[in-house]
Image (cartoon, rainbow, N blue to C red):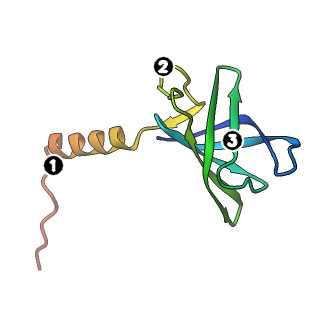
Amino acid sequence: MLCADLVDVSWKDLSGRRRKAVANLEDISSSGVCLQLDRPVPRDTLLQISHQKAEFEGQVRYCLYREIGYFIGVQFAPGCRWTPKSYRPRHLLDLRQLVKRRASRTRDSSEEPPSLTQ
C-alpha cells in the first residue's frame, strides 16, 4: 500500500556506531516497507523502524538513489508483520481498493459512451 508518514530509523554502521535518522515511509505491506532517507544504508543491515504507535525490525534488501534521496527496501524480520490494525500510517492508499471502486463506478454508470459521428 502506498503511504506517507515520518518514522524514526536506527541501525549500526559498518564501524559499529549507532546511526539514527528520520525517514519518509513510502509504502508498506505485511512483509516489509520502502523508506526514503537522505543517506544510504548498506544491504543486509538490520534496521529498527519506530513510530509512536508501532515498532518494526527488518533487513535492508536494496538501497537505490533516485533524484530526491535513497529509497531503501526493508524486509521485516521473522515474526514481525504489519497490519492496518497494528499501525495505520498518516496517509494510506490501497491501490487494489482504488481499482475496485473505479471498476464499480464504470459498471454502475448508466451513461452511454459518446458516439463518434461524422
Q: Is residue 101 left or right of residue 76?
A: left
Q: Residue furthest front?
A: 15
- For disc 1, the marked residue is 111
Q: Is residue 20 left or right of residue 63?
A: right
Within the image, what quadrant is residue 26 found in?
top right
Front tag of 1 and 3: 3
Q: Amino acid at mark 2?
A: Lys
Q: Tell me the element at label 3.
A: strand
- For disc 3, the marked residue is 46
**Neighbours of disc 3 within 10 Å: few (<14), some (14-19), many (20+):** many
* Residue at image coords 79%, 55%: 39
Task: Give how far apart the Cα atoms at labels 3 and 2 are.
Answer: 25 Å
Tell me which numbered mark, 1 or 3, is placed earlier along the sequence.
3
The disc at residue 36 is: none
Quarter of the image with the C terminus is bottom left
Q: Amino acid at mark 3?
A: Leu
Task: Give how far apart the Cα atoms at labels 1 and 3 are.
Answer: 54 Å
Q: Nearer the viewer, residue 15 or 75?
A: 15
Task: Give how far apart the Cα atoms at labels 2 and 1 are.
Answer: 38 Å
* Residue at image coords 78%, 54%: 38
Front tag of 2 and 1: 2
* Residue at image coords 52%, 32%: 78
Q: Position of residue 13 (x, y in %)?
A: 82, 48
* Residue at image coords 71%, 61%: 68
14 up-or-down from 104: above or below: below
Q: Nearer the viewer, residue 23 or 79?
A: 79
- For disc 2, the marked residue is 85
Within the image, what quadrant is residue 8 found in?
top right
64 up-or-down from 18: above or below: below
Q: Tell me the element at label 1.
A: loop
Tell me which numbered mark, 2 or 1, is placed earlier along the sequence.
2
Q: Nearer the viewer, residue 93 or 1?
A: 1
